[in-house]
Image (tube, rainbow, N blue to C red):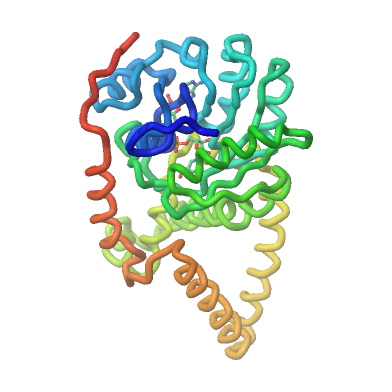
Amino acid sequence: MPDTHLPGPTVFGRIALIGLGLIGSSLARAIKARHLADLVIVTDKQDAVRRRAGEIGLGDEIAPDAASAVAGADLVILCVPVGANAEVGAAIASSLKPGVILSDVGSVKGAVIAALSPLMPAGTHLIPAHPVAGTEYSGPDSGFATLFENRWCILTPPEGSDIAAVERLSQFWRAVGANVEIMTAAHHDLVLAITSHVPHLIAYNIVGTAADLEEVTASEVIKFSAGGFRDFTRIAASDPTMWRDVFLNNRDAVLEMLGRFNEDLAALQRMIRWGDGDGLFDLFTRTRAIRRNIIASGQETSAPDFGRRAAEPVAEAAAATRPAVLPNKKTNS
Ligand code: NAP
């Protein structure tokens, strides 16, 4: 049974968050706003980020490093780029207390399990997670407490995981406003390859292609970007480190989905070449229906500007729920 702690439930006594970018700082804010822990200890490898965390009041304590942050924690969440999990895992393993749940937020799950499983001391629980929520911004100032509301968080417990630990972590994610789904890491990586990783690759590619076109000037690319291009540029502005790690760590699933994508693209190319208007019309009708389903499921707004204007009040609302600068007990800066 969770402790009760007005005005909301305290799901864990002590939570440690490692990495204070978009996701880590959003979690710190959401945990505080919803009173989900007695104590939140945060840290990041960069001095400047830890200092900034103190200035904006992320967490109750700022630890000088990951090992001291996790000491005594009941829940540890690694919020670092996928490729950094092994290094952080090695640094904290001997400081994890028995019974702790170690989780993460990485966009790839098989590689994270492979990196962390061998490091887990007996009596601790590795329950990886991926909140399917984000923006193209990074760093401690980019987070907001409402980021996870009505978004999905996918848990990928390895075979044989402790059922009670999985339930506790599910309860935590539901408490920050997310819907929880449980699946295998392999299935997660395949689904996310097509819904997230390949779309990002396409955006990076098309923006790169436009940037390289010699006959089109940079000013024209910007001036006429409302024709569709600008929506790709938003995605292509996403964090380079994070996305480099995603593609290096979900190689097989991404290559599999890219193969399918290339085949379908070749079919489209043929329809255009042979003037197959019916074929094009049929495909575009099917894809429009998918967009409508996404809007109907509450995962997107129907605003004609892809929700940009609607996002402003959301961001303001998020700012309003951010904790005011808290009297942080800063152990390092
Ligand atoms: P971010 O804004 O770049 O923040 C990551 C933070 O972790 C940075 O401050 C980084 O410092 C720090 N860090 C890196 N290595 C570290 C280490 N060894 N020890 C301590 N701190 C370390 O990234 P993010 O967007 O929050 O993404 C974090 C994770 O969430 C990634 O695994 C990503 O796949 C996942 N995710 C992201 C999104 C999204 O939309 N952004 C959505 C869902 C899940 P440096 O800047 O010095 O590297």
Using the image, determine if residue 319 lies above or below residue 276. above
- Locate residue 265, reporting x and y percent: 63, 69
- Locate residue 171, reporting x and y percent: 54, 41
Q: Residue, x 57% and y 42% (percent of image)?
A: 170
Q: Is residue 182 left or right of residue 296?
A: right
- Locate residue 248, reporting x and y percent: 63, 37
Tell me where residue 42 sits by quadrant: top left
- Locate residue 330, reporting x and y percent: 30, 12
Q: Quadrant of the N terminus?
A: top right
Q: Quadrant of the C terminus?
A: top left
Q: Is residue 67 left or right of residue 63?
A: right
Q: Is residue 81 left or right of residue 276?
A: left
Tell me where residue 43 sits by quadrant: top left
Q: Is residue 198 left or right of residue 230?
A: right
Q: Residue, x 78% and y 37% (percent of image)?
A: 159
Using the image, determine if residue 229 lies above or below residue 157. below
* Residue 86 or residue 331, whichever sits in front: 331
Tell me where residue 268 sits by quadrant: bottom right
Q: Residue, x 52% and y 32% (percent of image)?
A: 81
Q: Residue, x 47% and y 53% (percent of image)?
A: 151
